[in-house]
Image (cartoon, rainbow, N blue to C red):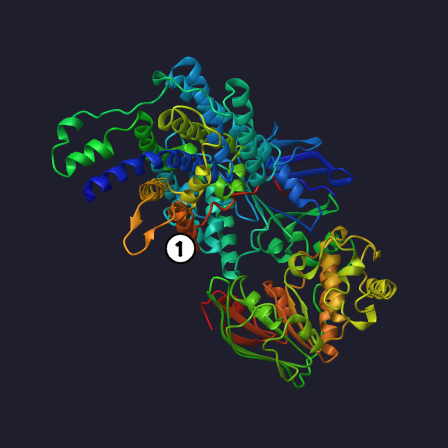
Amino acid sequence: MDYFEVFISILGSAIRLSIPLLFTALAGLFSERAGIFDIGLEGKMLVSAFASACVAYYTGNAWAGLGAGIVTAILFSMLHGFASITNRGNQIVSGVALNFIAAGLTIVLGQAWFSQGGRTGQVPASGRFSSITLPGADMMREVPIIGPLYANVISGHNILTYIAFLMVPLSWWILYRTRFGLRLRAVGENPGAVDTAGISVSWLRYRALIVTGFLAGFAGTYLAIAQSAAFINNMSAGKGYIALAALIFAKWKPVPVMFACLLFGFLDAFANFMQGKSLPLIGEVPVQIFQALPYILTCVLLAGFIGIARPPKAGGVPYTKER
Amino acid sequence: MSFEPAKEPAIELVGIDKKFGAVHANKNINLTVAKGSIHGIIGENGAGKSTLMSILYGFYQADEGEIRISGKPVTIRDSQAAISSGIGMVHQHFMLVENFTVLENVMLGAEGGQLLRRGVASARKELKRLEADYGLDVDPDAVIEELPVGRQQRVEILKALYRGAEILILDEPTGVLTPPEADHLFKVLRVLRDQGKTIILITHKLREIMAITDTVSVMRRGEIVATRKTADTTVEELAELMVGRRVLLRVEKGEADPGKVLLSVKNLTVKDSRGVTMVDDVSFEVRAGEIVGIAGVAGNGQSELLEAIAGIRKPSSGEIIVNGQSIAGSDPAMLRALGLAHIPEDRHHMGLVLKFEEYENSILGYHRDRRYGGAMLDLDAIRKQAEEQIVKYDIRPPNARLKTANFSGGNQQKIVVAREIERDPDVLIIGQPTRGVDIGAIEFIHKRIIDTRDAGKAVLLVSVELDEIRSLSDRILVMFAGKVVGEKSGEAGEQTLGLMMAGIAA
C-alpha cells in the first residue's frame, strides 16, 4: 500500500468519525450560546442512538429511526431545560444526571426488550443509512490524486454525513442572520438585556434546547444506524465530551467547530490506523497513546495556544430577575 | 402634600401599593408627572424608588392601584407591555450585550421580522434620524465593550427611543459617569424634554435634582412624603424630607496640621491578573494629621492602588513605606501590626462575612489578638467590645447577635468603620466609605474620618464621589489611566477636577 492510498483511507475514516462529533458540537453550540452549559450532550446522544436503533429495528425504516432519535433527544433536552431553566437548577449537575440516566436507562430497556446484554437486535439493511456513491465517483477513480480523493473521501458516505456538513453553514446562518439567532446569542451574554427588551428568557432558552436536541438526535442516530447496525452499550463512549472540547476549542463558532471536529476525527482515525503498527526507532506504540491524543491536544491548546476561549458570559447561570 | 401640574399628565400613578412578605415596599403611591417635564424621584436606599420603577416597567405587579398613561388606564404585565405603552428605561446597570454592536443592541427585541437584513437597514436609518433630532451620535457598528461608559449609556437611551418611548425612566444614571459626561447627559435630557418627551430621573444625589429637574418627589420608607416644584425647594429641605430629620450636608472640619510622613508610596506599579498595568509609577506621601483624597472615575487604578497598600495585591515594582518600614512581602495581618487599617471598597466582598453575626465581623482581621483569647475565642470579651462599638457608632439595630446581612447598608458600613478605626491605627486607608450608604450614616462616617485625622493619623481616601473627596480631603490627587495626573488643594473646584478625571487637563 503506498502512502497516498493510506492517507486517503485515513481521511475517509476521519470524516466518518468526525460526523457524530460535528452534530454533537453544533448541538452544544446552540445551548451554550444561549447560556446553558451542556455537559449532558453525551447522554442526549446515547438515548437517541438507542431510540433510533429500536425504532429502526422494528420498522425497518431508517428515517423512522432518525425521527425517533430526534424526538428522544429533544425530550431529554427538555428535561435538562426543566431542571436548569424552569427550576433554576445547576446546569452541570443536571447535565451529568442526564448522562447517568441515559447510560442506565438504555441498558435496562435494551436488556428488557432484546435480552442481549444491553444490545439491540441487528437492524436490517433497510433500517440503516447506507453509503451513497456520488455521480461519477466510479468514473473518476482512475484520475490521479483527484480521483481517489473524490471517490473515497468525498463520495461514499451516508446521507447523514452530507447533512452534517450542511448543518454548518445553516447553523451559522441561523445564529448570525436571523432574529432567533440574534436573541439566542444575546441571551447567552446578558439575559437581562433580553428580558428588558420584552422577550421571554425562558422560552428563548427552551427553543435553543430544542435545536440542541434536534442535532444531538442526528448524532445518536448516526452512531447506531449509520456507523453501526445496532445499539451497543455506552456506544457514545465519551464522544459527547470530545464534542464539548471541540466546541471550546472552536470558541463557540460554527465554522471553527467543523474544523475542530475534523481534526479530532482525524486523530481518531490515525489512532485506529496505528493500532498494532510499529514506528521506526520507537517500535510499537501502545494504541492508548493515540487514543489519548485528542484529550491531550485539547488540554494543550486550551492551556494557551488558541488564546483565551471566552465562553458566553451568562453561561452556567440560571436567570433570575433581580431588582 | 399635593402638587397640580400645569400641563396634561403623561403618567399618573394612583394608589400603588406593593408588599414583599412583611416588607411594605410601596405604600399608597400617588404621583402625576406632566408631559414634557423632568421629574425627579429622590430617596435613600431602600426607600422604594426602584420597586416603584420596576412596577412601571413590568418587572413586578402592584398589589393595588392603577397606572394611567396619557389619561388612559393601562396594565403593565411585563416589559413588553411597558414598551408598547411608550415607557423606556435606562437601567443603572446597563442592559447591553457587550460583545454586540450598537446596532445589534438597539435592534434586539425590535428586529422587524424573522430575518435581520431588512431590520438592519431600517435601524440604521432610524439611528440617523435620532442622531439628527436629539444630537445622540454613536457609531452604529462600534462594539459596546469598546465604548466608554457615557457612550454605552447613550446606547441605552437610543434603545428606548428606537422603541418609541415617550416616557423615559433613568435609574441612578450618573453613578458611572465623569462630571463632564454627566453634564452632557443632562444636556441630552433637556433636549429630549424640549422635544416633548417626559423624563423620570431616579437618584439619591440632591445636586442632580436641583440641576436638572422641573419637579421632584421625595420617597421615604415606601411612601412619597413630598412633591415640590424644584424651583421652590432647597437642598436642605429635600435632605430633611429624605432622612426625616435635619442633616448636616457640609462636613465641618478645621485646618489640617500635617506632621511627619506616615505613609509613603514610591514609584509604585501594579498589574492586574491579566497583566495590564493598572497603577503606573505612582508616588505620593500622606502625613500624620491630613486626609489625602484620590479622585478618579472608577477603573482608573484606584482600586488596585488601595489593594497594593493593603497588602492584598502584590505590586510589580516600587515601594510602600508605612511608619518608616517597607511593607514588601507583608500580608495584611503584618500590616495591621504595623499600624495600618483598611476599610475596603466593597464591604460585601472584602469587608464582611454577611452570614456571620455582627460580633463575629467586629473582630475579623483582629481575631488573633490576645484580647479575644487567641486560639480559643473569648466570646464574652468579643461580644462586650462589639456592644461598645454598637453604642459608640450608633449601629442599628443594636444587637451584636444579629446576622450581618440583616443590617442596612449604612449600618453594615459602620460595622466595618468601627472595627478598623477603633483599633487606633496610625495609617487609615479607605475605599468608597459611603457607597450605598444613606445620608444619615454618611454624615456620621464623615465625622469619624475627620476625627481620625484630628487625632494625628494619616488618612488616605479613595472615592469616586467627587463631592466626598472635596469635602473631606486636605489634598487631592487625581488618578487617570493608572497615573496620578495632578495634585490640588482640598479647595479645588469641581470643574478643574472633573476635567483632570476625564484625562483632559493636568
- Numbered label tally: 1
Looking at the image, which is closer to me, A241 or B97?
Answer: A241
Q: Quadrant of the C terminus of chain A?
A: top right
Question: Residue A97, position in %: x, y?
Answer: 58, 35
What residue occupies the far left of the structure in this picture?
A: A143
* Amino acid at circle 1: Gly
Question: Residue A202, position in %: x, y?
Answer: 55, 32
Relative to A266, B44 lies left or right: right
Q: Which residue has dot 1 on it? A: A307
Looking at the image, which is closer to me, A296 or A200?
Answer: A296
Mark 1 neighbour density, 10 Å: few (under 14) some (14–19) many (20 or more): few
Q: Quadrant of residue B294?
A: bottom right
Give the letter of the chain under mark 1. Answer: A
Instruction: Tell me which residue sits at (75%, 62%) in the image.
Output: B414
Question: Residue B94, position in %: x, y?
Answer: 53, 47
Residue B197 appearing in the image: no
Q: Quadrant of the N terminus of chain A?
A: top left
